[in-house]
Image: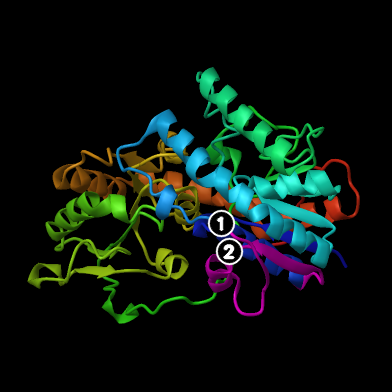
Amino acid sequence: MSRFLFVVPPLVGHINPTVGVGAELAARGHQVAWAGMPDAVRPLVGDGGTVFACGGPRLGEGGALRPPDVRGPGALKFLWERFLGPLAEEMTSGVRAAVAEFRPDVLVADQQTVAGGLTAELLGVRWATSATTSAEFAGALDGMPKVDAWLEGLLDDLRHRMGDPAGTADPRFSPHLVLAFTTEELAGRPVRAHDRIRFVGPSIAHRPATCDFPWDWLDPARPSVLVTLGTANAEAGTRFLAECRAAVRGRTDRLQAVITDPAGSLGPPTADDKDVLVLPYVPQLPLLERADAVVCHAGHNTVCESLWHGVPLVVAPIRDDQPVVAAQVVDAGAAVRVRFGRVTASKLGDALDAVLWEPGYRAAAERVGASFRAAGGAAAAAIHLERLAAGADEAPPTPEVTK
C-alpha cells in the first residue's frame, strides 16, 4: 500500500480529475489525501476524503479579480502575478505540513499549483504533475519568447524563496511523470516534456451531488443544449449568457436549453423562458449524458467531459488556455468557435444549428470520445502512479486497462 497526496488549486476543473484518480487508487488499497483550500476541495471529494488545509486566494476575488478586458499575454501575466504566484506562496506552508503528517510516497501536483512541485523537490518526494490542460506542453507560448522568459523568471523567483534554490525541475512539469487528462486525438503531439507525458484521457467518475436538478423538465423528444461558462467566469458572462438565451428562445420549437448562471445575471425567468431553464448550478456529468450540444468557454474540463459523452460544442474562449483548447476542438472537427465578446444571438443560433444538425460535428465528437475511453482515464492514471510509487524512474507508455 502506498500514500498519494494531491495538491490542488481552488478551481473545480482542476480538482475534479483528481477525484476519479483518487477513488481508483483508494479502490486499489492505497491511502489518498488532498492538500488545498477545504471549502473548495471538500464538496468535491466528499466527507470521507482526507483534506489538509492550505491558504490561498480565490480567482475572481480581491486582488485576483481580473478586469474582463484583459486578454492574451496580459491575461497570462495577471494570472501568474495576481493568482497563481500568490497561491504558491500561501499554499507552501500547508503543503509542507501535509507532507510531514501524511508522508506521501508520491505527491501529485496540479500543473498550476507549483507549491506542490517546489515542495516535493525541496523535500525529496517523488512527484507527478496533474495536467488538466494541454496548453503549456502544446506550444502555447511558442512565438512569444519574452512572455516565456518572463514566466521562467517568475518561477525561478518562487523556487529561490520557497523551494530548493539549487533545483532544476520546472515545477509545472515533473521530471518523473506528467499525467495529461486528454489524448493526442484532441491535443496533438506535445512539444514540451514529451518524454514524460502520458495521455490518459479525462478522469470521469462519480462525484458527490452538490445540487438538485428537475429532471422531469427535460423533454426527450427535443434536443437539449447546456450553456455553461464554468465557475470562474460568472461576472464576465452577463452579455454572453443573455445572447445565448435570446438564441435559444428563438429555437424553442426545435430545442430546449439549460443555462448555468452562478451570478444570477439573467434575473428571474419570464414567460418567454418556458423552454429555457436558468439555474445557478447544475450536475454537469449526469446532464451531459442527456445533452445534444454544449455552449461553453472552452474550459478544458468542460470540453473533455462533453467530448467523452460524444457531445459537439460551440466554444467561445475568454482567456488563459481557452483559445488553445478552442483551437484544438475546432481542429478536431467537433466544435464551432464564436467570439465571446462580440457574438450575437443570431450568430450563436447559426452555430447551434450547425453542431446540432450537421452530422459531422457529432461524428468528430464521438471519435475524440472514443480516444478518451481507449486511453483508460482514472484507471490508467492510477497504474502510472503506482509504478512511480514503486520506484520506476520513468513511466512506461499508457497501459492497457480492462474496460
Residue appearing at x 42%, y 70% in the figure: 283
Residue closer to the observer: 139 or 144: 144
x, y (%) of residue 110?
A: 64, 50
Residue 37's label in the rendered image is 2
Residue appearing at x 54%, y 76% in the figure: 208
Question: What amino acid type should be assigned to the residue bearing mark 2?
Answer: Met
Residue 131 in sight here: no
**Residue 375 appears left or right of 69:** right
Give the position of the N terminus as an image quadrant: bottom right
Residue 299's label in the rendered image is none
Residue appearing at x 59%, y 60% in the figure: 55
Query: Which picture quadrant has residue 343?
Result: top left
Question: What amino acid type should be assigned to the residue bearing mark 1?
Answer: Gly
Q: CA distance from mark 2 to mark 1?
A: 7 Å
Nearer to us of marks 2 and 1 is 1
Q: Earlier in the sequence, mark 2 or mark 1?
A: 2
Answer yes or no: do the residues labelled 2 and 1 have beta carbons within 8 Å?
Answer: yes
Query: Which picture quadrant has residue 44?
Result: bottom right
**Residue 130 appears left or right of 229:** right
- Badge 1 marks a residue whose secondary structure is loop
x, y (%) of residue 239?
A: 20, 50
Where does label 1 land, which residue?
56
Residue closer to the observer: 183 or 141: 141
Residue 101 in sight here: yes
- How busy is the neighbourhood of tag 2: few (under 14 within 10 Å), some, or many (20 plus)? many
Q: Magenta region: which residues? A: 27-55
Give the position of the C terminus as an image quadrant: bottom right
Magenta region includes residue 46: yes
